[in-house]
Image (spheres, grey):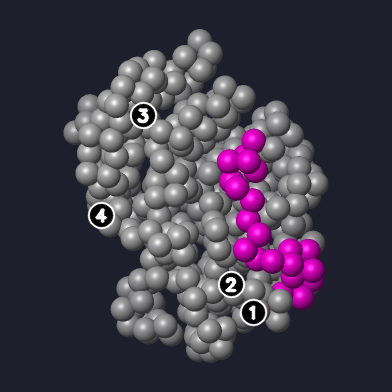
Amino acid sequence: MIEIGTMGFPYRASAIATGTAMLAEAEGVDALWYPDHLMAWHPRSLWREAGGVLAEVVDDPHAYADPFVAATVALMATRRPRVGIAVTDTYRRHPATIAQTAATLSELAPGRFVLGLGSGEGLNTAPLGIERKRPVRRLYEALEIITRLLGTDGPVSFEGEHFTLDRLPGMASTRAAGTPPVEIVLGGHSDALLELVGIYGTGWLPVLPTTASHYAQRLAVAQRAAMNADRDPAAIVPGIYLYAVIHEDHDVAAKALEGLLLRVQALAGNSELFRQAGLEHPLGPEFAGLRDFIPEWLPATTVRDAANELPVEGAQHFVVHGTPAEIVAHLQPFVDVGVRRVVLDNLLPLGIPEELEGANRATRAAIRAARLTFRSAS
């Protein structure tokens, strides 16, 4: 079975957020995912300069809701879809409190909450004065703590480089008998992180662009790690978080790639990805993408100029674009190599803000097409 999900409305607007969650359920969406950001990828000034209707709906791009609160609202407003975090980090949130929150949401909606974890992003940590030292090692320790707390009534003790626990009671008793354990998916791409997927994760949810053959090679790293840890590699749910520009008219989707806000989003790719596309990163040959891109720390003119230097072909490399049928065709090779979870994030309004409703229609059409195509095949 292929799970087809999309991003939930992540901003601090409770009525809209609740309505979009209920509409998504009515449309047959299998899962809603909420990002964990303190800062958006767009400086406020550029958002309001180029955002048009989008900036009228969401005046402040940085007004993200706490994803766990948003997940709670979505779980209570719906009955069927899974609701996930894509993804949080263990710098701002201690693994013990992450486990507590996960246990609480799992009790609220057994089998429907998905905990997404990653190694952190600069725009979430640098403004807090947090230095990201040995992020994968930190994530390893956090996963050990979280899985132990969720898997036992305790007590749990742990002493590591980053975290220490002393006889903390476990949280397994919050899960009703017969309900599944909390699902933990990891976002990331390095060998070290994929090994953590194999050892601890129930799923993998990468976001950077790749090919199906490269995806299969990376997935194999996690599967080998699972076998080495005496886990069933088939128990890992391979996923893909797809940044896409979707419209019922291909030419409209292609035109959106010229939009300023969409090109700003593409700057979050690192310089190596740009080199693979035959391009030099407009922010420098050693720019580290997610780790370095802190939009409000850069002059708006610098961000605007960098985005304008990015050719349409560059945006096309980082964001899949096309009609719902074309998006499904793009996903087919990934499903063929094992993907069982798809998250569609339609960025069309970043390219053409006036196409908010067109984006909603196209997203719904893409989800219906994906469900029909992949479930018929399975």
Cα–Cα gap, marks 1 and 2: 7 Å
On the rendered structure, is 364 left or right of 377? right
* Segment tinted magenta in the rendering: 50-72
Cα–Cα gap, marks 3 and 4: 20 Å
Badge number at residue 46:
1
Cα–Cα gap, marks 4 and 1: 33 Å
Q: Quadrant of residue 126?
A: bottom left
Give the mark nearest the N terminus, 3 or 4.
Answer: 4
Label 4 sits on residue = 134
Cα–Cα gap, marks 4 and 2: 27 Å
**Picture residue at 52% right of the left edge, 32% below the top:** 101
Label 3 Cα neighbours within 10 Å, binned few <14 / some 14-19 / many ≥20: many
Cα–Cα gap, marks 3 and 1: 42 Å
Give the mark nearest the N terminus, 3 or 1.
Answer: 1
Label 3 sits on residue = 147
Label 2 sits on residue = 42
4 and 2 marks in contact (CB < 8 Å): no
Please provide percent x and percent y for residue 360: 74, 57
